[in-house]
Each structure stands twice: as structure tokens, then as C-alpha cells.
């Protein structure tokens, strides 16, 4: 894995491009080449309006040789930083990095009690993440995920080049009670005095010495993958922050905190957080848990997955609060006291009806807390009876006369931080209307292989896991009779089946949708069974080949089985190996351009 940016060059080189009037066109061209799509008009306008204001300061400060990285993609996720300046620290000569968040705002109001702001003239009615919090999040993620920067000087600042000083003062750290690094993040407005302070800070901090070497070193630096979600549970139970949240993730946490205050005034809202695999839903859930626990609130985390919940219990260790905090959806039928916050993770697994004759499961969860939070991905509905959809939750809230606040996530934390792989899987399985399977385009941050046999897949994954000191798992469609667990839940000579995805003993077992959903591992192997095969240019689903009794009478089996393989194929953080027991299907997969493995699990070709 390596960092990447839209443009790398010296401040002087960018100044020439700006003087020629070619800045926006040059960045648009590079954007299309990198992302395969045109940038939004608002993004192009931001480049033209903000970047020159930073370059002018660098030139006036004599820092024309400082390296400028435009739109640096954050490690592990697809969030892009506006500008990152790279040079040497004046005192030590070591690498120095300055993250610059550009905002063209002129008017802004703080949202009291949160780290959010309201921007009157911006599109949309929802508050925005405070720019200092946003910039500091980028600083944190660089420090946390790029080993070479963990002892380096990494700063963040905000360039508010259209904002008057009087407005800026209302959102300064002391005024809005920002915390940690966000409170220390400097923000600079439009007045000449502010611009001079900005330039003086750059001069004091940065030297252009070895700037090019440092920038090239940063872009080629090793990026450590994010910690597994499960290894962070223990910290969350104890109310400690676990992950540096970025943009939509941080915004979601701040929204929930704001809704708690509103709910206590009688304006209860239901929070709906929607995102695909790896967009940070469960990370948000754990951060919410940590934040609420730290504030002394009554909070619970609930799922409909036995494996996921029991794994949370396991990783919480001997903390006696674990079983009170981590619960099942159906454990709220007889709740005697209301929670402050209920975090319903994996809410796509909600049942339309709860047991008995009482209210539906979703209504029970809404009633259980002042602020109920539902996190879901509609494409992960894989069993009949699971009906956790956006519409179900919105309809229930409407009937109960509660407003729904919906947050859509974008940034990918799984699959190498690249949403392109997620999209490729969805197109492969026909889950994107009008978009057939397309050829695989090799990515810097993710590896895709096709194996000729399950044995070849296993050999490759064992080697990769050993080489990278990481985890690997193989999961398959539910087309074979899985060995039954013992009465105590353990597998034959292995850990309990609920811990398959996280316990070292699960490495030699083949998992299924029931043990894989909700988890992540570094390397994923996926065996397509005969229940989904490729015929005559399209997928054919065959329920008679499936051994899962839960779906044998499902009228929508075709939809469920495609979603099942989508879930299995998006568990890997670094790479995935695909194999189908059906020869025609495996040939089709091989022709899509992924790297092929030989029978010993050795890559045969460079991905085309």
C-alpha cells in the first residue's frame, strides 16, 4: 500500500500553472485519469478559489521549493485532503508535514454543544463538521497509519481565506470548546493581518531543504493497515477513543451527540447511518460507545448477529459490563428503564416482527432510548425474514411521530481504502442496475486473484498471511453440510464457531455467511458454490444447490444469494482470492483481468 495524490510539485511549479490559467484544467485531467470520472463542479471551483491563496503565501515567504501534494488520499480510506505541504522542520532538518484544509466559507455559526458548525450559504440544511476537527482528523490519521510520520512533526491548519475575523472568532477553539488537537489547530481568515500570520507560521515551521526527497519518501512510505475492529473493543468498553474518525464518520458521532440534547427537550429523532462495506459503520458504533461511556450515559450496543455479539463479549475480556453493553436486538422487549443512546449496529438484520404480539422489533428499539441509532447496509440482507431497510425504519419512526436524521457514508476503510473494489464486486454480481461485470483495473491498495482450485487459494493465503503477519480466512457459499458444533459451541479441535473470524484457530476452517458477516480480515478467500453460476452472459441462481434451510423456500433467493457473495467478497482489507467450483464461472472470473494463481498458489501474471 502507498499514498497517492492528484498532483505533486513545488509551490513554484504550481505558481506557474496558476499564472497560465491552467490550474483547474490540469487538476480535472488528472482527476479523470485517477478516478475514471469527472470531478464535481463544486470541487473544481474549490481548487480554483483556494489553492492559489496558499501558493501565494508560500511564494511570498520564500518557500517556492516546498512540495505541495494536492488531494492526498488519506491512508486506508478514500477521503482526500485538500493540500499537504512537505518540507523539513527548521530546527531538526527532519521531514515536516502541514495539512491544510481549505474552506471558501464567509459566514458560519457554531452549533453549541457539538463540534459542528452551520454554514448559512452552503447547500443542504445539515450542519458541517468543524473545519479544525476535520483538519486534525487528517493529521491524526497520517500519524497513526504512516509509520515514518509517527515521530515526525505533523501539523494541521485551516485556510478560511474568505472569512472575516469577527466571524472566525465565533468558531475558535476556546469559543466552541473544541478538544485535543482540534483546539490547537490554527485557523486563518481573510484580513491582511491574518494572511501575514499565516505566512509567518509557514516560515517558522517549514524549510524547503530536502522537500522533494521527503515528499517522494512520503508517497512511497509503508502504510500500516488499520487495527482490526475487534482489537479495539476493550478500549471502547472503558470509554476510550479508538479510531481517528474522518469527515462523515466524525460528523455522524457529532450528530448523535447533538440529538441527545434535542431529545431531552422533547424533540426525539431517530438517527439512520447508511453505508456499504468498510465505510466505518462499526467504527462509528464503537466510537459512539466510547464517547457515551466517557460521558457517563446509559448506552447499549445491539446487533442481530450471534457471532458478532459473542465476539464482542470475548474481546471485552473480563469486564463485567460487556454483556450489559453488547446485546441482541431481541433483548429489548422487556427493557425496564430507558437508555440514553442505543446503537443498533448491522441493522439490516432487523426482523419485521418481534416475537410475541407486541410492537415490531424496530419500534421496540426506537422506544428503548432517547436517541436510537441504526447503522445499516441494505445490500447485506442475506436471509428471509431480515428486513432492516431504510424504508422500514423511516416508516416506523413516522408512525411514532419522530423525525429521522439520515447520514450517508462514503469513505471506505475496508478493501484497501478504495471504493472501486466494492463497486467492482457489486457490478460483478449484477447488483448495480444497468452496469454489467467489468474488467478489473489493478489498484495500488488492493490485490485481486483468481485461483484454479481451493487448494491453490489456501496455499496462497497461508503464504500471504505469514509474509505480512496478518489474518486470512476462506469462506464459501452455503452449498455443503458444515460440521456441527459440539454442545458447548466449539468446533472439532477448534474455537467456538462464533469466534471463527477472529480466533487464530479459525485459520484452518472454512467459514460461511453466518460466521463472516460483520467481520474483517486482511486476506479473504471466497469459494462460489453451484448455487450461483454464470450462464449465457448472466448469473443463474439455483436454490436446490444451497444447503441453508433458512433460504430453501425464499422467493427472492436470487437476490439473497448475490448479497451473500457480496458480503463474503468484501471482508478482506488487503486482498481477495476468488474461486468457483463451476468451471464456466471460474473461467469467466479469470477473464475479467485479475491476477491468476497457478496450482501451487503462485501468481502467474501481472494483473492486466
Image: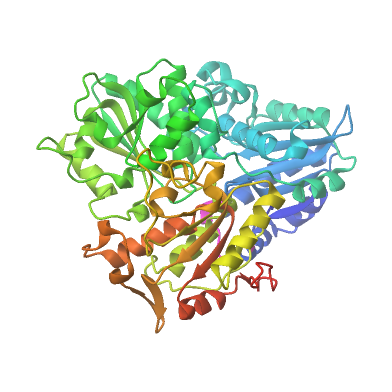
Q: Is residue 395 left or right of residue 318?
A: left
Image coordinates for residue 190, horizontal then vertical, percent: 63, 32
Residue at x 28%, y 38% (from the top left corner)? 404
Q: Is residue 383 above or below residue 195?
A: below
Picture quadrant where residue 297 is located: top left
Quarter of the image where the C terminus is located: bottom right
Farthest residue, direction left: 357
Q: Is residue 402 magenta?
A: no
Q: Nearer the viewer, residue 245 or 36?
A: 245
Does residue 309 lie above or below 421 as drawn?
above
From this view, report whether residue 427 is shown above or below residue 366: below
Front one among 420 and 380: 380
Q: Residue at x 73, y 26 (%)?
A: 197
Q: Is residue 301 visible?
A: yes
Colour style of the rendered protein structure: rainbow
Of residues 608 and 304, which is closer to you in this image? 304
List x then y, in percent, for residue 102. Answer: 61, 40
| Point 38% across, 46% down: residue | 485
In this rendering, does residue 412 appear at all?
A: no
What stretch of residues is rendered in magenta?
34-43
Residue 261 percent location from the top left of the image: 34, 21
Height in image: 80 above or below 266? below
Residue 252 point in image, percent of width and height: 43, 35
Say which quarter of the image contains residue 114: top left
Tell me: 303 left or right of 421.
left
513 lies left or right of 388: right
Amino acid at each position: 500500500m502507498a499514498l497517492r495524490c492528484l498532483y505533486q510539485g513545488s509551490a513554484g511549479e504550481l505558481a506557474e500553472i496558476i499564472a497560465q490559467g491552467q490550474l483547474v484544467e490540469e487538476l480535472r485531467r488528472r482527476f479523470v485519469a485517477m478516478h475514471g470520472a469527472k470531478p464535481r463542479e463544486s470541487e473544481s471551483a474549490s481548487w480554483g478559489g483556494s489553492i492559489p491563496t496558499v501558493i501565494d503565501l508560500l511564494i511570498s515567504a520564500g518557500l517556492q521549493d516546498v512540495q505541495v501534494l494536492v488531494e492526498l488520499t488519506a491512508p486506508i480510506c478514500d477521503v482526500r485532503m485538500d493540500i499537504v505541504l512537505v518540507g523539513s522542520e527548521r530546527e531538526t532538518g527532519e521531514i515536516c508535514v502541514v495539512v491544510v484544509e481549505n474552506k471558501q466559507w464567509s459566514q458560519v455559526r457554531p452549533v453549541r454543544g457539538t463540534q459542528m458548525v452551520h454554514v448559512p450559504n452552503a447547500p443542504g440544511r445539515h450542519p458541517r463538521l468543524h473545519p479544525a476537527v476535520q483538519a486534525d482528523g487528517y493529521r491524526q490519521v497520517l500519524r497513526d497509519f504512516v509509520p515514518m510520520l509517527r515521530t515526525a512533526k505533523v501539523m494541521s491548519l485551516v485556510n478560511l481565506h474568505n472569512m472575516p475575523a469577527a466571524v472566525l472568532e465565533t468558531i475558535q477553539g476556546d469559543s466552541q470548546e473544541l478538544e485535543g488537537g482540534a483546539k490547537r489547530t490554527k485557523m486563518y481568515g481573510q484580513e491582511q493581518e491574518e494572511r501575514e500570520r499565516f505566512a509567518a507560521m509557514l516560515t517558522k515551521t517549514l524549510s524547503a531543504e530536502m522537500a522533494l526527497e521527503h515528499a517522494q519518501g512520503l508517497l512511497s512510505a509503508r502504510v500500516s493497515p488499520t487495527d482490526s475492529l475487534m482489537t479495539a473493543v476493550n478500549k471502547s468498553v472503558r470509554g476510550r477513543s479508538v479510531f481517528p474518525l474522518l469527515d462523515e464518520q466524525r460528523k455522524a458521532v457529532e450528530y448523535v451527540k447533538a440529538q441527545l440534547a434535542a431529545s431531552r427537550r422533547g424533540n426525539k429523532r431517530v438517527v439512520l447511518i447508511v453505508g456499504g462495506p468498510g465505510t466505518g459503520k462499526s467504527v462509528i458504533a464503537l466510537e459512539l460507545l466510547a464517547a457515551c461511556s466517557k460521558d457517563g450515559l446509559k448506552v447499549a450496543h445491539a446487533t442481530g448477529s450471534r457471532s458478532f455479539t459473542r465476539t464482542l463479549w470475548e474481546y471485552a475480556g473480563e469486564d463485567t459490563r460487556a454483556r450489559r453493553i453488547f446485546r441482541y436486538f431481541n433483548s429489548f422487549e422487556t427493557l425496564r428503564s430507558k437508555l440514553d443512546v442505543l446503537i443498533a449496529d448491522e441493522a439490516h438484520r432487523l426482523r419485521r416482527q418481534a416475537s410475541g404480539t407486541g410492537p415490531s422489533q424496530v419500534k421496540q428499539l426506537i422506544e428503548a432510548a432517547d436517541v436510537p441509532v441504526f447503522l445499516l447496509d441494505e445490500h447485506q440482507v442475506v436471509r428471509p425474514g431480515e428486513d432492516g431497510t431504510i424504508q422500514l425504519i423511516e416508516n416506523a419512526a413516522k408512525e411514532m411521530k419522530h423525525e429521522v436524521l439520515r447520514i450517508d457514508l462514503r469513505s471506505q476503510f475496508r478493501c484497501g481504502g478504495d471504493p472501486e473494489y466494492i463497486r467492482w464486486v457489486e457490478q460483478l454480481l449484477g447488483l448495480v442496475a444497468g452496469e454489467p461485470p467489468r474488467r478489473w483495473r489493478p489498484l495500488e491498495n488492493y490485490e485481486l486473484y483468481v485461483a484454479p482450485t481451493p487448494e491453490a487459494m489456501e496455499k496462497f493465503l497461508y503464504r500471504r498471511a505469514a509474509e505480512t503477519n496478518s489474518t486470512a480466512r476462506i469462506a464459501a457459499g452455503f452449498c455443503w453440510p458444515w460440521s456441527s458444533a459440539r454442545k458447548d459451541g466449539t468446533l472439532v479441535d477448534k474455537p467456538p464457531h462464533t469466534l471463527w473470524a477472529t480466533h487464530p484457530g479459525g485459520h484452518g476452517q472454512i467459514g460461511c455467511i453466518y460466521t463472516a458477516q460483520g467481520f474483517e480480515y486482511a486476506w479473504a478467500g471466497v469459494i462460489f458454490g453451484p448455487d450461483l453460476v454464470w450462464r449465457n452472459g448472466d448469473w443463474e441462481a439455483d436454490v436446490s444447490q444451497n444447503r441453508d434451510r433458512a433460504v430453501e423456500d425464499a422467493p427472492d433467493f436470487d437476490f439473497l444469494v448475490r448479497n451473500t457473495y457480496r458480503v463474503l467478497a468484501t471482508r478482506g482489507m488487503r486482498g481477495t482470492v476468488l474461486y468457483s467450483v463451476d468451471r464456466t464461472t471460474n473461467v469467466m472470473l479469470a477473464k475479467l483481468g485479475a491476477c491468476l494463481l497457478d496450482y501451487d498458489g503462485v501468481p502467474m501474471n501481472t494483473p492486466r
